[in-house]
Image (cartoon, helix red, strand yellow):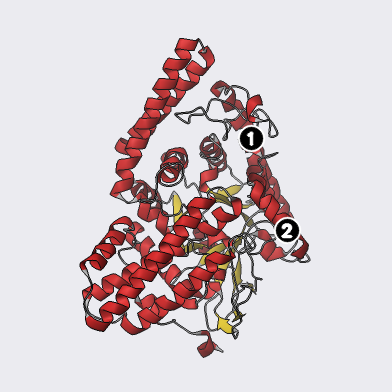
Amino acid sequence: MPEHLGSFTFVLHSHLPYVIGHGRWPHGMDWLNEAAAESYIPLLQAFSRLAAEGGPTGVTLGVTPILAEMLASEVFRREFKDYLDNKIQAAQEDLATFQRLGEKHFVTVAQMWEGHYRELKRVFCEDFGEDLLGVCRRLMDGGALEVITSAATHGYLPLLGRDTAVQAQVKQGAASYRRHFGRDPRGFWLPECAYRPRYPWVPPLTGVTTEPVLRKGVEEFLSENGLRYFIIDSHLLKGGKAIGVYKDRFEALERLWERFAAQYQERPEDQQKSPYLPYLVSSAPESKKPEAIFTRDPKTGLQVWSGEWGYPGDGNYLDFHKKRFPGGLRYWRVTSAKADLADKGPYHPEWITSRLHEQADHFVSLVHDILAEFRATHQQPGIITAPYDTELFGHWWFEGPEWLYQVLSRLQKSTRVSLKSAGSFLEEAAPLSVISLPEGSWGEGGYHWIWLNEDNDWTWRHIYPAEKEMEELAQRWADDPDPRMQDLLKQCGRSLFLLEASDWQFLISTFSARDYAELRLVMHYEDFQRLAAMARQYAADRNLSPEDWNFLESCRERDAIFPDIDPKWWSRLEFPPEERE
């Protein structure tokens, strides 16, 4: 029997900021519609095909709580069908134009798009019953994949100003998962793969001077809530150069990195640790259960992430940037990574299949080679953890879901490599080595510079006072039995969650939707301020004006998220670090 080399898991991180009720196009609801049409449905179709073929996919699928809230919304279900109808109409209008102009090749591509969106609508309505989370549950029930959770609104945990704020983000993440998936979560995606150990912390803002406060390590919050593992970038484990995955896609990040490069000091690489083994992490006393970690494999990662020499940069694939307006459909191919939009050649769907098979074969061969080398060196099987943003497959790289299917289909048939989700691997190969990790995140430089720099420093000067106010409100009135006070506190918590989303700092740094991000952050801050003032006023005399009640109801209708939110999460820190010293 062939020697077992090891295991493999794709970790797909699915996340978008809350957009329902906050705009449609170019920024807002269409982000969610695009992701569902281009990534979520095609990938769930691929996983369903693999499950029907008789084996696990080994996929570890991250769905952030705020994304789950949106996908479960009736508003999404209604607007998504309208979105698909608009795309079908756009394809029909393009088809009529191309036929009139004698553009025979583009006629065939327009016909492809019409059929594509008609089939998406059929799958969504008939096969999936308009319930994408339900499809995830069924696949998980059948052992095909594992869904993991994350922080409530993807808050950047190391930079949140108070441990109660981190606690609330994690607890809401676990509670939301139980509500949507009917079980306890095992895994947790750290937003932006950002980790901070326990240490005396001060706000990293210029001009702010406070006494250091002992803060808990991020892993402590996961451990306290029954979560077993999270994912890190390879440089946090081994040191060495942190490899950015987004810098090549956003010119603004390239310029930003030039300003920070002089401050970046690469850690010496630790040859003793391997990204192909899980470890246990703890920065707390031994009495607290440590968390397992899985580490991103840099070799397979760059093969897919790199837009220049990775698979998505293949000249035959559909180009992401060049679109035909007004419908926004795409008719051109990448041609070359450096080609200007004017130089893009026509897209030929018939050229794609052979390239997908070649690149799937190449990737599977790479997986076998890496695991074989690790087994020969370490005398034990390892696991390759390959994390990507879900939206890379389908949205950025149109052919990505089919490529992923081809890779997993080949690995399903492999006699030497097993497909296992991270949680399943832990069940069979529990790590014993306890290590410490430095502070950091994914990306170039491996630290917080994308989420804290001179362009977005001001955002934290809004977030920190709001977190302090929420803690004070909860300490005073979280146990108040008055249902109206509870409604006020819960909506304060929802506004704070939305304010804390890491998306705003990222969008400001990348300039990709800077105005939208700034407006959203300011709006959530102002909502929180008014709601907090209303809570204090109501506590004083149990009375508010009709206009105030109207404002509360307006916020609740627009930001209808997290019905299980609990103000007590902000009132008291479980297992304060001082008590563990």
Q: Earlier in the sequence, mark 1 or mark 2?
A: 2
| In the image, residue 476 above or below residue 531 | below
- 407 vs 416, nearest the viewer: 407
- Dot label at residue 359: 1
The local secondary structure at tag 2 comes to helix
- The residue type indicated by label 1 comes to Gln
| In the image, residue 364 above or below residue 280 | above
* Residue 272 in the image, given as x and y percentages of width and height: 74, 66
- Dot label at residue 571: none
* Residue 233 in the image, given as x and y percentages of width and height: 63, 59
Q: Is residue 555 left or right of residue 315?
A: left
Asked if the residue at tag 2 contacts the one at tag 1, i.e. Cβ–Cβ closer than 8 Å, the answer is: no
| Point 41% across, 57% down: residue | 66
Identify the residue position indicated by label 2 in the image.
Answer: 259
- The residue type indicated by label 2 comes to Arg
| Point 59% across, 44% down: residue | 415
Pointer 1: residues within 10 angstroms few (<14), some, or many (20+)? some
Alpha carbons under labels 1 and 2: distance apart: 37 Å
The local secondary structure at tag 1 comes to helix
